[in-house]
Image: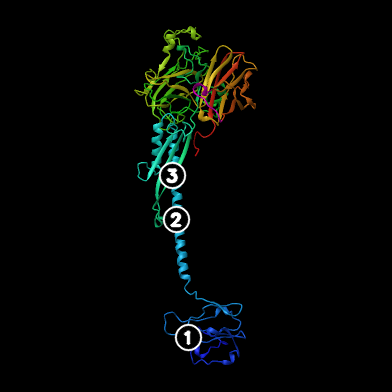
Amino acid sequence: MTLDAPHSVHPEMHPCLGLDPSVPWKPSLMSASLIPIRRDMGLYLGDDRTTAHAERWCGSLLYGKPRGARWDRYGIAPKVAGNPAPGCLFDVPISFNNQGRIARVTSERGAILPLMAIVILVLMGAAAMAVDLGWLYYQSLEIQHGADAAALAGVIHEPGQRMQAHVEAIAAAAKNGFDDTSLDTAVSVVDFLDDPAMVEHNGQLRVTVTHRVDTFFLPIFGINDVDIARTALAEYVQPLALGSPESYFGNDPAQGIEQGLWGSIHGTYTRKRDGDRFATLCDAGGSGPACAPNPEARPAVNWGTADAEGGYLYGIEVADGAAGLVVEIFDGHYYKDGTLSTWTGDGSPGGSENIVTWFMLYGPDPTPLDTTDGNELLCSVQYNPRADRESTIPGWDDDWDDFDEADPAILASMWDSMATSSDRQGCAASFDRGPGTYPLRVLIEHTSSEKGKNKYSLRASTTSGPSPQVSGLGDMSIASNVESGGATDFYLARVEERNAGTMLVVELWDPGDISGGNGSDNVQIFDGFGSIPDCDWSATNGDTGTGPCVIVTGNKIFNGHLITIRIPIPDTYTCSGDTCWYRIRYNYPSGNITDSTTWAAYIEGNPVSLIE
């Protein structure tokens, strides 16, 4: 330490201060009188507040303070502990109380080192904790993604293929890095039949993935790994079954069964306003490719192959335990003579009428609206057009115009089994592929300038086990041929309990084209219990309505127009069996119902979604 003037130090202090004894001491700079601070310590303070002086005491001294400097910057300089030789430590703080006495004498030199060591340890621990917490958070996201993918992959197989749903869910989890066979991973798959408390209905699937994650720095604190579990609940809203809860779709003349409708599909360039919304390429006017195009058309392509698209789809639901599936088609050919107008009367609007109709059966599919996603084509039948029935069906009489007049044996012969049909293009030896929905696609080849309307019926059976069900999928083109006027009910769509709290959307294309109709004719929607629900509806002709679902359709006011109907399904909705079927009533007391139309029904929203 170097003391600048006007500091003064007594020569006795030199050994402690380490000053040169040859430096002269200037008493003139010392105060004449000293004020005692601690007489028992021999410490004094100059009364002029310019100089501090102290006598040696226990190896300590009080050294001088410059004028105007703070007193707490100067103080006692003790001997170094354990050093027998006199020693001094300078700039050791000293404080004075308000009586001028020394309040405390402390030394803080070196105290920052242990403090910094503690701070560094804390910061390192916090950094290590942050690294591990970030890692665990990232892993939790990955586990959640694995559970989501597994639930979505499996749920599309519910409820018809439960075992497949479990297999696909576990496989999807493994593809995302969470293998159920690994010692550090467990995958749990639960559907409605497994645990109704965890899953609300048979269209849901819950998957829980539990994975053990190793840590990086937490082992210092004894945490070597952490088990993280994440769950996902997926829901699949299947396409609604349309048109029939039976093992047949359409009338069955051989058994005298009348559903009041036929399956129907129109030729390539038949006008859309004639009733077929999707199969025809023409919106209106013209003939052939020059017509105004139908913006909703589904062009038929790749017929006779697994990649075929276009036309309409039907679903054949085969239950678990059923075997020996048989699929039959009634009157699959298009007949140019257009006979049997009240039966399968194939319309003949002119043109080439070279209508070639294909029926293609696929193996069970959890997503039956898409048959190009790897489906097995079980059988395809190609029906070429025929001039008339009388020359091609032995014993046929063109004078027949009613079921009661026809020969039942001849009608029965018109049912053609796909597996043995002379028109088949290739079929598997057996159609049995387990339970599920077997899609059946019907389309007309889009070539040349065909016009016409082919009508048909479908039925399915099994040699053992429960009977299958045949229905339209998503939408259906039909011909409703009922001779007598009045009210005729048709099955519209099956709405199950799991659809409670959702919105049923019904679309009717070109409804109400009947012979002899008037302004009082109407269409009504009924639930499965016979009640007319409230609905909101709007049509492309500008008409709208709300309230009880009764829509006046007389005088063909919706010819070439679409009616969209929205029906809320109550949260408390329950049903079973036939009561799950919503119905549509054609209330046409003034004329015969000979209407070609296209119906669609679906539950609003994404069909496959995560709800948890």
Residue found at x 35% / y 23%: 430
Q: Which residue is mark 3?
A: 229
Q: Crowdedness of circle 3 by 10 Å Cα count: few (<14), some, many (20+)?
A: some
Residue 420 position (above or below residue 185): above
**Residue 538: x percent and y percent?**
62, 27
Residue 349 visible: no
The spot of residue 36 in percent (x, y) is: 58, 85
Rendered image: mark on residue 16: 1
Task: Calculate the distance from the C-alpha at mark 2 to the C-alpha at mark 3.
Answer: 20 Å
CA–CA distance in space, label 3 to label 1: 72 Å
Q: Earlier in the sequence, mark 3 or mark 1?
A: 1
Task: Tell me the SS state at disc 3.
Answer: strand
- Report which residue position mark 2 lands on: 131
Residue at the (62%, 17%) spot, across then down: 521
Q: Residues within 10 Å of mark 1 (few under 14, many from 20)?
A: some
Residue at screen point 46% across, 50% down: 137
Q: Nearer the viewer, residue 132 or 28?
A: 28
